[in-house]
Image (cartoon, rainbow, N blue to C red):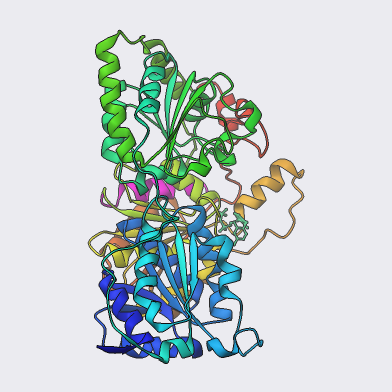
Amino acid sequence: MKLTGAQALIKSLEMEGTEVMFGLPGGAILPVYDPLIDSSIRHILVRHEQGAGHMAEGFAHATGRPGVAMVTSGPAATNVVTPLCDAYMDSIPLVMITGQVPYAVIGTDAFQECDTVGITMPVTKHNWLVTDPADIPRIVREAFHVATTGRPGPVLVDVPKDVANMEMEWYWPESVDLPGYKPNLKGHAKQIKDAARLMGEARRPVLYVGGGILKARAAEALRELAELTGFPVVTTLMARGAFPDDHELCLGMPGMHGNYTAITSMQQADLLVALGARFDDRVTGKVGAFAPNAKVVHVDVDPAELGKVRRPDVPIVGDCRLVIEEMVKAVRAEKARKDWPSIEEWMAQIRAWQERYPLVYEQLDDGPLKPQFCIDMLRDHTPDDTIVAAGVGQHQMWTSQRWKFNDPYTFVVSGGLGTMGFAVPAAIGAKVGRPDKMVWAIDGDGCFQMTAQELVTASAERIPIKVAILNNAYLGMVRQWQELFYEERYSEVYLSPDLPDYVKWAEAMGCIGMRCDTPEDVVPTIEKANEIDDRPVVIDFRTDYREKVYPMVPAGASNDDVILDPAHDIPGGRD
Ligand SMILES: Cc1ncc(C[n+]2csc(CCOP(=O)(O)OP(=O)(O)O)c2C)c(N)n1
């Protein structure tokens, strides 16, 4: 059967099970948009290509399946660099198709030409420039394979216009053959045994759980390991939901804005079992002062992570689920072989910290609306399995701190790159992937202004997401740093609460817009929003600009120097 390269591309995407793609057409990708009309693939037309990339990421976060996006050449390709980098940092499987100028004119500075493969090489796991239409099925198959196996990540396929127009003989490759790419999934048996031995000696152990647990679909295996050992678990920003917050062993988020107990338990641990975590600086603080007395077991499917920041005592390269399942067996054997030391004293210490240093804030009945209160009310007045997407800033940290993430794949967040503007498009992608679930974006007013136009996409495509803007009139997180570390010299952080008028803007984009100013209006407004199911909703919560995120470990400081909410200085705290 003869097909054009463009037809072969769409057919290959179908063969890979693509049901939905996000994108926006243009000159160089025109040939591929034509056969799309006859395809089973649903295409969602975005208003800016960055939105397409983040939607594909949100889809992948919520479903575990690769997100697919397609855009044209030049400025469209450069517009997707941010989501590609975001997906690269957070190991999100993403397949990005870009149009390219005809092969014959590449290198001539043709209209809308850019070196897409060159520009995106450092932010993709791999990328391909197609030079022959006969390669398309093989390359698409490889692209999905690379994006979804080993440590997942974004890939890009750049398709010159003339290659898309040329004919090829259709085939579908039986298998993928990439001799240089064979991720090692099965952990080394001796190393796993060594890890179990260290676990059987520890008196102050902590399971340090990262986003790799979610990527490896290892939440169940993790729970078995935690319950078998009785070890407490910290879940990083990327791992929220990988271990249930309502589990008695869950300590929640560590790091710069983690809670005191999660931070300090890691700091004082004698053993850290790092599972799919990468010792990010936002978790470790000053690396030289991080967990000084801890031995480290480090499990990661990406060998480059082992020893990158902290030298592990036991490095294990492998898929987290497979390794943890083997670890469970090794721990059982170790427990049968000898008595394990009691960790009761350690757990008592942890309970004492939890009691002494809870997360605090105070919402006065007639006082300004606190952002934490809005999040608490959202948490308490939405279904338990609600998916939450966050932007980047104070609202993101409060969301991670205060939401109860009891299920995996319910927090859609930009951790590594920290991309403002992530929440709205990512929430749209998550809702497309999980239409059965309620999806809320919790966004900052600064973030919202970066990608809000994708609500036009959501309205047009009838994707009923809900957006809570915590409108504090400032680039709040930057203001917080200027207040604490630049002597309250506020430089270029004021945004105004009324410009734009968020309710009118939402309405202009086909959404329902609401505004909430007072604590007593919060729950009724959320309930009203929950009832709307035929279009997106935006709530403009007018929140207290003075509120800061605590605890806080200043950048570059040791985790021993965590700054607590000043309320902790008041005997008994504020609550
Ligand atoms: C694209 C991008 N530009 C700049 C930043 C730096 N930055 C981090 S948080 C933040 C402020 C976010 O403000 P807002 O969305 O209002 O959220 P808030 O902190 O007030 O909750 C800025 C500017 C970023 N993370 N991403």
- Residue 16, given in percent of the width and then of the height, sits at 28, 69
Task: Please give the range of residues in magenta.
Answer: 367-383
Residue 428 visible in image: no
Q: Is residue 413 magenta?
A: no
Q: How many marks?
A: 0
Between 308 and 33, the residue placed more toward the observer is 308
- Residue 538, given in percent of the width and then of the height, sits at 41, 66
- Residue 310, given in percent of the width and then of the height, sits at 57, 32
State ligand 1's quadrant: bottom right
Q: Is residue 340 above or below residue 460?
A: above
Between 545 and 222, the residue placed more toward the observer is 222
Instruction: Classify residue 2 as left or right of residue 371.
Output: left
Q: Is residue 75 above or below residue 549?
A: below
Instruction: Classify residue 331 as left or right of residue 237.
Output: left
Q: For the point 34% across and 75% down, which residue is it?
A: 137
Q: Is residue 379 magenta?
A: yes
Instruction: Classify residue 64 as left or right of residue 399.
Output: left
Residue 294 visible in image: yes
Between 207 and 425, the residue placed more toward the observer is 207
Q: For the point 65% across and 28% down, which residue is it?
A: 288
- Residue 29, given in percent of the width and then of the height, sits at 45, 86
Q: Is residue 390 above or below residue 18?
A: above
The quarter in which the N terminus is drawn is bottom left
Q: Quadrant of residue 52?
A: bottom left
Q: Quadrant of residue 94?
A: bottom left
Between 321 and 60, the residue placed more toward the observer is 321
Q: For the point 36% across and 9% down, which residue is it?
A: 341
